[in-house]
Each structure stands twice: as C-alpha cells, then as structure tokens.
Image (cartoon, helix red, strand yellow):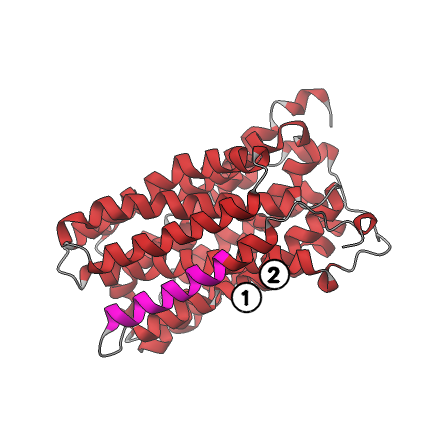
Amino acid sequence: MKAALRWYLPIVIVAATLNLRPALLTLGLVLPAVQHSLALSPFGAGALTALPIFALGLASASAVPVGRRLGWSGGLIFALLLVGAGTLLRSVGTDVTLYAGALVLGIGIGLGNVYVPTLVKARLSSRIGLAMGMYTMMLTTGALISVSLTPAIFAHFGDWRPTLAVWAIPAFAAALVALPPLVDNLRPQEHIPGMGLWRNGLAWSVSAYMGLQSAMFYAIALWMGALIGARGQSMSAVATDLTVFYFTQFLAAFLMPVLLTKSRRQDLLAAVVALWNGIVIVCIFYGPPATILTFCGLLGVGTGAMFGIALTFQVIRARSTDNAARLSSMAQCAGYLIASVGPLVLGLVNHSADARLASTIWLLVLAAATMIAGMLAGRPRFVDPTEGN
C-alpha cells in the first residue's frame, strides 16, 4: 500500500463501519408505525426484520467472487452504495419497496461485513487485536448514534419513511471517503488448493458462533423495544433503555478482541460471555421494572463482547489474508442465515398468549447454543490446511 494511504485506511474503516448497522436497527424503533401504516401481519413484520439478515448471509457467500472482480476496496465502495440505495428504496412506502429495499441494504451490509475485516487483516495485521477492537467499537457506535437520534428524527417528521431514509446519507458519504484506497486495490488469489472450509469442523464452529450470537443480538435489537414496552415502559423510556444497551456495547466491543487475542482460554471466555447474557435476559424480563435500565446496560456489555469475539475468531483462526476472507465469508454466510431465524421466531412468539415467557425461553435457547459453539470455536487451532484440521 502506498505510504501516503497508510494513515488514511483507518479513516475509511471507521467511515464504512459506522454504516453497517443503522439501516438495520433503526427499523426496530419505528416498526409499530410501519405495521400500522401498511397493515402488516405478525408474520409480515417478522419477515421484514428477518429478510435483511437473511440477505447478509446470501451476500457473504458471494463476497470473495465479487472481491475478485472489484478488489477489496472496490467491493467496499459497492457495498456502501448498496446500503444507501436499499435504505432509500425501503423508505418509498409501499409493500414491494419495503421488502425490496430491506433485501438490497442487507446485501450491501453483508458484503461490507466481509470486506472491512479483510482489509484489517491485509493492512493492519501487526495490530490485529487493536484494529478489530476499533472495528467492533465503530459498529456499536453506529448503532448507538442511530438509535439515539431516530426518536428525535421521527418526532420531527412524524413519519417513518423520511426517518429511515435519512440514514442513506452517511452511507453515500462513506462511499466517497472510501475512494482513495482504490489506487492500491488488493484482490484475492484465484484459487487456494485444499481450502475446503465447508468441510472443516473448526470453520463450522466459528460460523455457528457467529450465527447464534447474531440471532440473539438481532432478536433483541429488533424486538426488545416491543417487549419492554409491554412491561409498561413509554416510548421515550424504551429509547433510553436501548440507548444504554448500545452505549455499553461500545467499550466491551473494543476491549474484547484485545483480551481474546491475549487469552489462553478463548473457549472459556466465549462460553462465560454467553452465559452472562442468558442470566441478564431473565433479569430484564422478570426483574423489577425499575431495574430494566441497569440490566439493559449489562446486556449491552455482554452482546458487545460476544460480537467482538465472533468477528475476531474469523480473523485469528486463519493464517493468511485470503483464508481469513474465505472464513469470514463462510462464517457470515452460514451465520446470518442462522441469525435470520432469531428475530423471525421472536416476532412470532411475541404474539403468543404469554409473550414474555415464550420470548425468554427462545433467547435462553440461543444463549445456550451460543455457549456450546463458543467453546468449540475457541479451540487454539487454525482452518488452514497445513494444520490438518
């Protein structure tokens, strides 16, 4: 990479990463308005929250072929343009554009989720723990900013359409910021003999951990507002609870990749974090209402740490940049296909006779499965064929 661009890459990573969550998460705050406006059924609302996450998985499978044609930097610009275009399309206000836009923005985010860690692996490998910490911290920062501002934007416009459309602006701006690295646009190798990750047990463990922790996170992010609201919380109180939830992810997402790369028991660390989240979820749904805000903060710590672990596994379980990209592509393809089930099921059980109990059970199942996957993915091995895994 040209010397003049070395200092600039972190700016690109920050700008791009800040746009990989807002388009997904802002929907949760205005979902009741969307349901009322378009008369969506419970299944329709659940499908709307699951569709972009499902698209993340499909897009991740094509990230390496697209990267081979456009390069890692070119692919990132393409991904950001898709995020912006999909966000605008979803905001047009018809049933067709609502789902089509969700699909397009999900594809863009799925590609970006692979390209950013790949650039980190390729250009910042000497400080991988710190760089991945910065990456996960920026993801949570984007979520925090969008969730904090969306209620005020909705109050200003009084309509969910422009409220969601606003978030296309920073995505297009980030695409412009990402243009300079095109002068040194890395591309993946055409073929790596013996890289059969889809038959690799460790790769599947990393993918399962990615998917299960994402299923839990997106189920919480997109339906927690409705579930907390059912306990008597006002919209402003729910917004505050969610803001604290995202804020406390900030530090955990930054520190966990650093701690993970230095830990000798990565399997135990991953398992403990999943157990923590399961306990806190029970406290949110069944503890005194006055403690919801505190436990939302503690849940943010756990989910931020879990996400940092999931992304770091994808980088440190492979030796080379290209293998890390392939592992990331597989983990996010299989992972987000798994993850799409999280909000879909929670949306369905949210309309059951005892929504709180059914929702708690579903989230605890996800927490237990994540704990098992984390113990397997945390083994000190590599997916590269030289290890014979």
Residue under numbered circle 2? 333
The x, y position of residue 189, in whole percent, is 82, 47
The x, y position of residue 236, in whole percent, is 17, 49
The verdict on residue 365 being magenta is: yes
Quarter of image, res 201: bottom right
Name the amino acid, label 1. Leu
Residue at the far top in the pictured view? 4
Q: How far is disc 1 from disc 2 in space, using C-alphas?
A: 6 Å
Tell me the element at label 1: helix
Which quarter of the rendering shows the N terminus?
top right
The x, y position of residue 288, in whole percent, is 14, 54
Residues at discs 1 and 2 in contact (Cβ within 8 Å): yes
- How many numbered tags mark residues here? 2
The verdict on residue 13 being magenta is: no
Q: What secondary structure characterizes most of the magenta part?
A: helix
Whether residue 83 sits left or right of residue 251 in the image: it is right
Name the amino acid, label 2. Cys
Q: Say if 238 sits above or below 74 in the image.
A: below
- The span shown in magenta is 355-371
Q: Say if 15 sits above or below 281 in the image.
A: above
Quarter of image, res 128: top right
Tell me the element at label 2: helix
Which quarter of the rendering shows the C terminus?
bottom right
Whether residue 359 sits left or right of residue 98 in the image: it is left
* Circle 2 crowding by C-alpha within 10 Å: few under 14, some 14–19, many from 20: many
Residue under numbered circle 1? 337
The x, y position of residue 82, in whole percent, is 54, 54
296 or 100: nearer the viewer:
296
Residue at the (67%, 56%) spot, across then down: 202
Q: Is residue 42 visible?
A: yes
Whether residue 357 sits left or right of residue 193 in the image: it is left
Q: Is residue 77 visible?
A: no
